[in-house]
Image: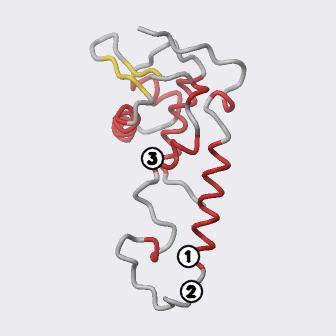
Amino acid sequence: MRLLASTDFALRVLLRLAADPARHRSTEVLAGETGVPRNHLHKIVQELAEAGLVRTIRGARGGVMLAVPPDAIRLGAVVRRLERAQVLVECFRPDGGACCLLPECRLRGALGGAREAFLRDLDRTTLADCVGGAASPVPVL
């Protein structure tokens, strides 16, 4: 399974924020630290904020920080949210695609099961598990 570049970028941002969750970073700093192009970063931060994973702080001293502790963020949930509009193969489209093999084809079931197994495996891993050293808790404001 291949993740979208935007999902890769979002995971990079989350990992960077999890390394020091009490600190907020400007999008300029985050772009430099993660290698995520600034024009993509704004959209990614917005998506992560809508998901309740990050908090944005406006103003000259503003920035982005985690909204929940790193050990409460499951990678499977993040990937599910960010990849929700992506289909593995055409027959996974809401309209069923243009599959010429239906109704005999069993590939859909096999691929769907593999995708779910992949996500279940990611559910066992938290953001904190992926950060070197112990991540400090997110402060309650």
Q: Which mark is residue 81?
A: 3
- Residue nearest the viewer, comparing 77 with 63: 77
The quadrant the C terminus occupies is: top left
Q: Position of residue 53 (x, y in %)?
A: 45, 30
Instruction: Please name the residue shown 58% across and 74% down the image.
Output: 109
Which mark is first along the chain, 3 or 1? 3
Q: Which mark is residue 108?
A: 1
- Residue nearest the viewer, comparing 103 with 52: 103
Amino acid identity at mark 3: Arg
Question: Residue tagged by mark 2?
Answer: 105
Q: Is residue 62 left or right of residue 135?
A: left
* Location of residue 69 with respect to 2 vertically, above or below: above
Q: Do the numbered discs 1 and 3 sit on residues whose CB atoms are within 8 Å?
A: no
Residue 114, image quadrant: bottom right
Instruction: Please name the residue shown 45% across and 86% down the image.
Output: 99
Amino acid identity at mark 2: Cys
SS for dot 2: loop
